[in-house]
Image (cartoon, rainbow, N blue to C red):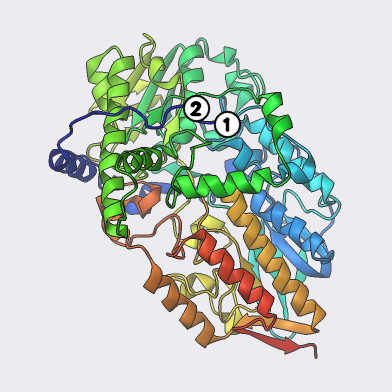
Amino acid sequence: MNCEATRTPSPDEIDIAELKEKYRRERNKRLRSEGQKQYLRTQDDFAASYEVDPHMPVVSRAPIAEHLDVAILGAGFSGILAGVHLRNAGVDDFRHIEHAGDFGGVWYWNRYPGIQCDNDAYCYMPMLEETGYMPSKKFCDGYEIQAHCQRIANRYGLYPRALFHTLITSLRWDETLRRWRIATNRGDDIRARFVLMCGGPLNRPKLPGVPGIEAFKGTLFHTARWEFDYTGGSWRNPVLDKLSDKRVAIIGTGASAVQAIPYLGKYSKQLYVLQRTPSSVDKRPNPQTDPEWAKSLRPGWQKQRQAHFNRIAVERFGRGETDQICDIWTEVNRNVAAKLEAQGWPELSIQEYFAMREVEDFLVMERMRRRVDDIVSDKSTAELLKPWYRYLCKRPCSNDEYYETYNLANVKLLDVSKSQGVERMTEHGFVADGVEYEIDCLICASGFEVTSDLDRRWGIEIIEGRNGKSLYEHWADGYLTLHGAMTCGFPNQFFTGYLQGGFNATTTEQFGRQGFHIAYIIKEALRRGAEIVEPSADAQQAWVRTIRQTAVDLTQFQRDCTPGYFNNEGSQKIRWYLGESYGLGWDAFERLMHEWRENGTLDGLMLVANQ
């Protein structure tokens, strides 16, 4: 499981000044004044298609009117882990409310061919030791991950009270009841003392706002709502045999498309790939789990591996530390560490260290571009596939069949980076560079509402706290929280995700620790007879000041990046997809939260006793 190479081979000489200018030109070519408005919201013109569950029939039920202690909004990993920690804290009066038909979140909805996790599964899939489960390989298939979501939910008894196929339409604080009133599309009136916001960053798909898209008379779907009835095959057996006489176009070349395109190229009569910005796509060694290695593991191994991954992917390698993950996420730091080892580990300032990382960033991306030349036969196609931007401007991908797909005679790559991209849709296809291409099916790999405004991302029309104040207005100019978990004016409401807390390279570990912290506060509030818990304005202001004083300034990096969801489509209103992270790092943040809990005073929170 260890990485044999100490340093990934990369070009010896590059001209960084020349590359920066090339990156700038490529970025500017893709800038669009509409920002997020270039995408359609699936709850508007296409609501019917995206609110319907293609995987499981909706079962009718009577509306629910009830009081309960905790409502968990969302049933992906964030919501699941919140439920686990509430259960472990002795808080049992809760239920999940979820749009999908089962637990899993993004792993429930996304069933496109080739779907796998992009991160080391031994880190990403949480609670492996607690459930006694070992992933089958380094990058697990989607159905294995969703089964693990179900495994955890079953182990901790989360199913009996979960409300599936239920969309929240409004969330209002009722000062008279001192509870949150939750209205749903099923006619429910749920009055919850506490509300946990557990909608993940990949929970709402978006569609490309191509003019005339509603006029297209062929089949159209998003990768997050894959139609196997049309393509043939299934989630577990992606043999897309019904596409043998079909002309297919896929718009977008991000992580989902990189995984699906090899299958579309293999089975379609004709495949058009409509690309605005290419992804960087590395090789993907994906060995089966070695049973002898699994037997050798000692208790606590997963937390140790997650901590190791966070150090080598996000923070700083320790001297003498060997990369156990060995993939694209750790390459930059791994290569920096190899250079430091050769130099005898000199003392470096943080500025000097980041300067070394920047050089290695350019080297790694040049290696990626040369990989394209090594694989893709047609040189003009190869040029279009090369990523001209900094590492982490766009989500890094890995796949052993993606570039090879462009060597197939039935696959054509179309560059739509200029002007307005795809000019328009027609009844029979699409127009690009003045040419109409007739197609039978358009597949949208256009991503999710990751850095969109919160109303688009969460899909809840109304969220109102005390005195009817909108949360969307409250955070219009930036997040205002205490520890990233609560905000003043919205009592008994808790948040998970990328707001103003610590950042961990393993998403599920970060969300799990957030759930643990929230469960502690709720347990203490109930134990102390508090009906309301809320941050004070002073405590919130102090925390926001701390966040911004410790922040690593990424503004210029974000502005230099090619437009995408990582930087809010390159708009002037930069919104980083990771929120505002605590600048001193994950371990420092976790120590701070541990000390805060150990202090026992719930410092910064106002508690109001039961009436």
Q: Which residue is mark 1?
A: 116
Q: Residues within 10 Å of mark 2 (few under 14, many from 20)?
A: many
Q: CA distance from mark 2 to mark 1?
A: 8 Å
- At a point 51% along the width and 23% down the height, the residue shown is 285
Q: Nearest the camera: 499 or 37?
A: 499
Q: Nearest the camera: 492 or 444?
A: 492
The reply, left or right, for residue 566 in relation to residue 260 is left
- Kindly indicate whether the residue at mark 1 contacts the one at mark 2 (C-beta within 8 angstroms): yes
Q: Residue furthest front?
A: 344
What is the count of numbered marks?
2
- At a point 70% along the width and 36% down the height, the residue shown is 297
Measuring from the top left, give residue 56's x and y in whole percent.
Answer: 74, 37
Measuring from the top left, give residue 366's x and y in whole percent.
Answer: 26, 31
The disc labelled 2 sits on which kind of residue?
A: Gln
Q: Nearest the camera: 473 or 42?
A: 473
Q: Which residue is mark 2?
A: 259
The reply, left or right, for residue 299 in relation to residue 366 is right
Q: Residues within 10 Å of mark 1 (few under 14, many from 20)?
A: many
Q: Is residue 79 above or below residue 519?
A: above
The disc labelled 1 sits on which kind of residue?
A: Gln
Q: Earlier in the sequence, mark 2 or mark 1?
A: 1
Q: Give the quarter of the figure containing the N terminus.
A: top right
Q: Quadrant of residue 302?
A: top right
The reply, left or right, for residue 178 in relation to residue 429 is right
Measuring from the top left, give residue 106's x and y in whole percent.
Answer: 61, 43
| Helix, strand or loop status at disc 2 | helix
Measuring from the top left, give residue 535's x and y in whole percent.
Answer: 59, 81
